[in-house]
């Protein structure tokens, strides 16, 4: 009896037509049965936002007539897409959710803001093994071919070995040729942050507006971080969880005078 192919949910934050998700879909079709539920427009930087004050639309789309996957275009956020897939579109829980391939880095503190990773985290909350993939190239003409080999290796390992409950993988891929990628490193999230600035301007009607800009600062000198790996030619994998509890501070907090 032939082995049943895994059901794989594919989403992203750059939109259903973005080159990154099309590359990810190509790889996932080699691995399992694919259903795509992705935003109808770019949703970068949305984090874990959900739509609660307006209606949601989720429509079947055909982007490639020869492709085997089913696809849906959703008017909501990446997290909305995962919720919609789980509750309205799929007839069973998927064996895996993959998000990406994002156009740009989601290493270090960027994971907090990332719609790509928030979609994966939402899947993890719902008990679905999940991976977020990002390529360190913001261009819509980015070359995703070197990523495909490693995406498939990581996906097959997750399907084979599983993930602990509540843990998802944050995978970042350097902008290098396949020959120049040195391999994969398991990492921790670097202690890095953005020093942000607002570029203040005035429109022709006299109203002030702002563009957010800033500088990324990595103060972490460790050689076990995602930033170190990426800057030295490695793909980084950081196991990520949605439990934000500062467990190391609980005991000290219990010693505070908080009770009458």
Image (cartoon, rainbow, N blue to C red):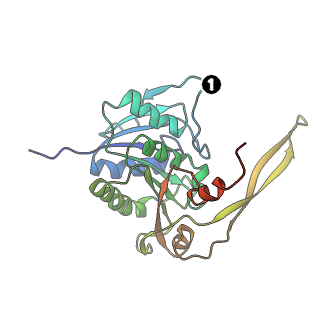
- Per the image, label 1 sits on a secondary structure element best described as loop
* Residue 162 quadrant: bottom left
Residue 132: x %, y % from top left: 46, 52
Q: Which residue is more in the foreground, 48 or 254?
A: 254
Q: Which residue is more in the foreground, 125 or 169?
A: 125
Looking at the image, residue 41 lies above or below residue 255: above
| Residue 115 horizontal side relative to residue 154, left or right | right
Q: Residues within 10 Å of mark 1 (few under 14, many from 20)?
A: few
Residue 107: x %, y % from top left: 56, 61
Q: Which residue is mark 1?
A: 53
Residue 95: x %, y % from top left: 31, 44
Residue 11: x %, y % from top left: 45, 43
Q: Residue at x 33, y 62 (%)?
A: 153
Q: Name the quarter where the C terminus is drawn.
A: top right
Q: Name the quarter where the N terminus is drawn.
A: top left
Looking at the image, residue 234 lies above or below residue 94: below
């Amino acid at each position: 009896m032939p082995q049943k192919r895994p059901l794989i949910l594919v989403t992203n934050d750059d939109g259903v037509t973005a080159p990154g998700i099309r590359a990810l879909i190509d790889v996932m079709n080699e691995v399992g049965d694919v259903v795509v539920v992705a935003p109808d427009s770019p949703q970068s930087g949305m984090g874990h936002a959900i739509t609660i004050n307006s209606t949601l639309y989720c429509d079947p789309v055909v982007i490639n007539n020869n492709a085997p996957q089913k696809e849906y275009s959703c008017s909501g956020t990446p997290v909305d897409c995962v919720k919609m897939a789980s509750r309205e579109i799929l007839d069973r829980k998927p064996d895996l959710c993959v998000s990406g391939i994002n156009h740009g880095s989601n290493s270090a503190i960027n994971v907090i803001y990332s719609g790509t990773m928030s979609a994966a985290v939402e899947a993890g909350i719902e008990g679905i093994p999940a991976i977020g993939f990002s390529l360190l190239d913001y261009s819509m003409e980015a070359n995703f071919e070197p990523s495909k080999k490693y995406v498939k290796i990581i996906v097959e390992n997750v399907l084979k070995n599983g993930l602990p409950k509540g843990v998802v993988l944050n995978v970042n891929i350097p902008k290098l040729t396949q020959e120049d990628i040195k391999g994969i490193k398991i990492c921790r999230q670097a202690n890095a942050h953005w020093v942000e600035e607002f570029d203040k301007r005035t429109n022709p009607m006299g109203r002030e507006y702002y563009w957010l800009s800033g500088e990324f600062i990595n103060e972490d000198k460790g050689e076990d971080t995602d930033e170190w790996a990426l800057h030295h030619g490695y793909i980084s994998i950081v196991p990520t969880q949605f439990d934000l509890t500062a467990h190391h501070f609980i005991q000290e907090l219990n010693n505070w005078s908080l009770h009458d």
